[in-house]
Amino acid sequence: MSISPAELYARLRRKEPTLLVDVRMPADYARWQIEGSLNAPQLRLPDPTQVAAEVERGAVGPIPKAPLVVTICGRGITSAPVAEGLRLLGYDAASLADGMRGWGDHYEVLPVVEGAPTILQVARPARGCLSWVLISEGEAVVVDALRHVDRYLEILEARDLRLVAAVDTHAHADHVSGGRALAEAAGASYYLHPYDAIHPIDLVPAAFPYEPLLERRTFAFGDSMMDVLHVPGHTLGACGLLVDDRYLVAGDTLFIGGIARPDLGGRAESWTPLHQASLRRLLALDTEVLVLPGHFAAFSEADAEGRFASTIGSIRENNVGARLAASEPERFSEYVLSSLPAFPPGYVDIKRVNLGLQVGDEARASELELGKNVCALTATPGSPAGS
């Protein structure tokens, strides 16, 4: 008996009681796990009866008989006998189909705004990554497309849409971008800010052509308009996209529960003042502007339908980093620089792949993307930073 990644995500989103038992080795679990799971490598046994015996003798402590226990491994193979062993003891248990590999490649498409324009949220829950499809009168703009381009091509085909542009709000470091590949597949232009078309560590320019995403550049698609706001800080070329003066696709600058980190270019101290000025600019928008972020840190940031969106007014009130952006520069800088998570070395190579400076085939991309993004600061002052 197995459960698909889509079914598991639906349970977690609906907050249905679910116990997650991850039987991978501790090092693999530490690198990447599903929020709230229990690591139990002791149960990584090929024989269900052995698993049952280990559980009965309390090898991993008491396992409550929740309505459903989901066992997890890397590929959905070693977790199957664990689920079977638990079922021998009367548990309602299922293994996660395709394991963490399947979980990592799962996408969720959900309408956040319907009408003129229509805005679709395309999420990759395992990585906390969000991308957006903006639609008006049969035309579409895809922002921050994730690696699996076929998901977006399916949306375009199902809705009979013409892709006007594929836009990256910045040069991504946490995941392999699908923006350029999507633009090529759909015969559209790919847009990136020129500052982000240079690798911040290597100082080498992108190895492909692109259209410049510049301050106050305006895109028309259908009956809608999208204005470009250059908001450096997370990267030097980071941009926000203001759609019809009502919706802000914020990229990795401003999140629901946190703000971006300014150190991934190796210049945290010099980029932090830029970041503060950019946050102030975005937070000065009308309180009813709906913010559509590039990442989420926890499933709890979504509403009951699974939509990761919040108004400027709500973020001003509830987001600690956003509130501190309004404080004096010294206080903001102290907060940011004391809250930075460890720098992920793989992010340097991901940027190389995204700028065409390094080959990124499927195997390499999967290896580089292993784990959840750590592009955000979600810490309160004096506490460790989250992702």
Image: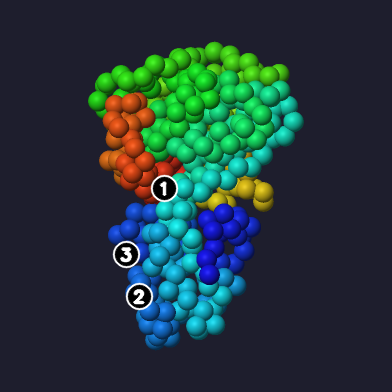
Task: Measure the alpha-carbon separation of dots 1 and 3.
Answer: 18 Å
At horizontal 55% and vertical 51% (from top left) the residue drawn is: 299
Marks 3,2: beta carbons within 8 A: no
Three-letter amino acid code at the position of disc 2 = Leu
**Between 143 and 255, the one nearer to me in the picture:** 143
Residue behind mark 3: 25
Task: Measure the alpha-carbon separation of dots 3 and 2.
Answer: 12 Å
Residue behind mark 2: 45
Residue behind mark 1: 372
At horizontal 49% and vertical 35% (from top left) the residue drawn is: 149
At horizontal 65% and vertical 35% (from top left) the residue drawn is: 158
- Is residue 298 at all visible to an observer of this figure? yes
At horizontal 64% and vertical 42% (from top left) the residue drawn is: 110
Q: Looking at the picture, does residue 357 appear above or below residue 25?
A: above
In the figure, is residue 44 to the left or right of 311?
left
In the figure, is residue 166 to the left or right of 67?
left
Q: Element under label 2?
A: loop
**Between 11 and 97, the one nearer to me in the picture:** 97
- Of labels 3 and 2, the one closer to you: 2
Q: Element under label 1?
A: loop
Which mark is drawn over residue 338? Answer: none
Rate crowding at label 1 as few (under 14), some (14 to 19) or many (20 or more) other CA atoms within 10 Å: many
Q: Element under label 3?
A: loop
Three-letter amino acid code at the position of disc 1 = Lys
Three-letter amino acid code at the position of disc 3 = Met
* Label 1 vs 2, first from the N-terminus: 2
Rate crowding at label 2 as few (under 14), some (14 to 19) or many (20 or more) other CA atoms within 10 Å: some
Marks 1,3: beta carbons within 8 A: no
* Label 3 vs 2, first from the N-terminus: 3
Q: Which image quadrant for residue 133?
A: top right
